[in-house]
């Protein structure tokens, strides 16, 4: 048994209790259905067609359960394949699906390097896996081989700067505890971490919390035998070299250099994002979406008035009321705070967002002049879409 497989058999990750499925649905990025449409299908996917999805390295099932449940809630058909090398993780994911009555999932134990043998998929989720492969590029290439024409991938890989302090500890523990069983490694490493001095980079890093949440989280963060981080430059290069093209990051604002400083004209888009990552200093994961390079496309944009906007994580009436009252709601993510500074006359447009009306229908319903609508909507889109709060999808349109 490989060291990585032994880890996840001993400590399935993330730690989950299937009984909790009766209380909550864990949502996030990637693989939120609105993000899938927005970033990979420009908000225009035909949801009358079943979504063929692969969850590659599905762990204990967070992405799997989110995707399957959201598709069920929307009344849309999906054919989902779960793939993971850990039987212990698979057992938890299966039980979570059973508790929810999600029956459209095929469970497979195996390596994502063999993904193409399982079929062709419209959407591939690979969250927190590629950075644990001995050859991540081989993983990217293997997933491309399983991608159906016109499809795309949602991914998460580790980023270096927000994980300050992690890699020296991983290296030290790897040397100190080589050959020990997982439980013994965990016990010994916990004793060391408890005595780290105040000024240690790991102890003073506010971006890290997995080690406090569970034994599985501690092991995955500090004792993993295969773990590499990608900065923006390396990530984009790896995508390019393996036939992928970046569609966009789930939180574009984090990579927008113009929100930090003036952008020199000679910089490429990738160079500007790489500098933003360094200046932010708090990004610990890159969450994004990619398509086949020969089918490269950008995320949805509101110039297409047939698109249907949704608010993610916000209630339209509440946001509209706050904006109408002149409030500037605070946003907080990745250690960064920002405020929404939308004009009061944006409130009627925000209140009309219901996930079913198109932009042209919202303009008509609010009696907004088309030219004025275009200018105002551009402001709304810049503030909300760049923060991952505004997405386009016709999934609820009947």
Image: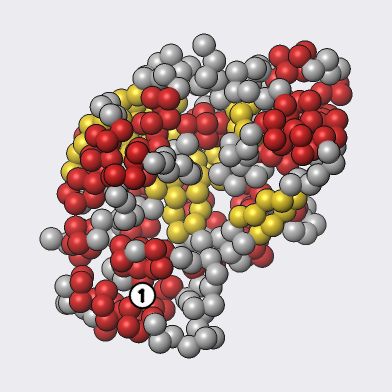
Mark 1: give few (<14), some (14-19) or many (20+) Cα within 10 Å.
many
Name the residue located 71 percent from the left edge and 36 percent from the top edge: 319
Judged from the image, the secondary structure of the residue bearing numbered disc 1 is helix
Relative to the observer, which residue lies in front, 266 or 16?
A: 16
Percent of width and height locating residue 300? 61, 30
Percent of width and height locating residue 100? 31, 33
Identify the residue position indicated by label 1 in the image.
170
Residue 177 appears in the picture as rendered: yes
Name the residue located 34 percent from the left edge and 41 percent from the top edge: 21
Relative to the observer, which residue lies in front, 98 or 19?
A: 19
Count of labels in the image: 1
Q: Quadrant of residue 279?
A: bottom right
Look at the image and tell me in which quarter the N terminus lies.
bottom left
Percent of width and height locating residue 295? 49, 30
Name the residue located 31 percent from the left edge and 51 percent from the top edge: 16
Q: Work out whether 6 lies above or below 269.
A: below
Tell me if 396 is positioned left or right of 151 in this view.
right
Q: Work out whether 12 lies above or below 29.
A: below
Q: Work out whether 131 lies above or below 308.
A: below
Q: How is the image coloured?
A: secondary structure
Tell me if 373 is positioned left or right of 231 in this view.
right
Residue 123 appears in the picture as rendered: no
Tell me if 44 is positioned left or right of 177 in this view.
right
Name the residue located 40 percent from the left edge and 37 percent from the top edge: 66
Percent of width and height locating residue 44? 55, 21
């Amino acid at each position: 048994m490989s060291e990585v497989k032994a880890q996840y058999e001993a400590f399935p990750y993330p730690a989950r209790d299937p009984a909790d499925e009766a209380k909550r649905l864990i949502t996030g990025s990637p693989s939120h259905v609105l993000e899938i449409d927005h970033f990979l299908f420009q908000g225009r996917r035909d949801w009358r067609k079943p979504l063929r999805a692969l969850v590659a390295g599905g762990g204990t099932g967070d992405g799997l359960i989110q995707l399957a449940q959201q598709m069920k809630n929307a009344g849309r058909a999906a054919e989902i394949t779960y793939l993971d090398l850990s039987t212990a993780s698979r057992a938890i994911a299966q039980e979570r699906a059973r508790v929810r009555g999600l029956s459209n999932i095929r469970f497979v134990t195996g390596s994502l390097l063999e993904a193409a043998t399982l079929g062709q998929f419209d959407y591939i989720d690979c969250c927190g896996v590629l950075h644990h492969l001995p050859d991540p590029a081989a993983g990217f290439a293997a997933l491309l081989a399983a991608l159906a024409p016109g499809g795309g991938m949602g991914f998460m890989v580790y980023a270096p700067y927000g994980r300050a302090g992690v890699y020296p500890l991983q290296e030290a523990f790897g040397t100190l505890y080589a050959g020990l069983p997982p439980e013994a490694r965990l016990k010994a490493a916990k004793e060391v971490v408890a005595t780290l001095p105040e000024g240690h980079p790991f102890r003073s890093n506010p971006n890290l919390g997995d080690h406090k949440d569970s034994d599985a989280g501690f092991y995955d963060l500090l004792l993993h035998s295969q773990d590499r981080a990608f900065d923006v430059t390396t990530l984009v290069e790896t995508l390019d070299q393996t036939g992928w093209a970046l569609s966009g990051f789930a939180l574009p604002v984090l990579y927008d250099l113009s929100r930090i400083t003036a952008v020199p004209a000679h910089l490429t888009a990738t160079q500007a994002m790489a500098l933003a990552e360094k200046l932010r200093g708090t990004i610990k994961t890159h969450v994004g979406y990619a398509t086949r390079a020969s089918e490269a496309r950008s995320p949805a944009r509101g110039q297409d008035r047939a698109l249907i906007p949704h608010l993610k994580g916000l209630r339209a009436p509440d946001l509209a009321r706050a904006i109408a009252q002149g409030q500037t709601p605070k946003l907080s993510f990745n250690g960064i705070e920002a405020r929404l500074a939308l004009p009061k006359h944006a409130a009627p447009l925000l209140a009309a967002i219901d996930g079913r009306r198109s932009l042209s229908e919202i303009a008509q319903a609010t009696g907004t002049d088309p030219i004025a609508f275009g200018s105002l909507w551009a402001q709304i889109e810049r503030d909300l879409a760049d923060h991952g709060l505004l997405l386009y999808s016709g999934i609820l349109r009947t």
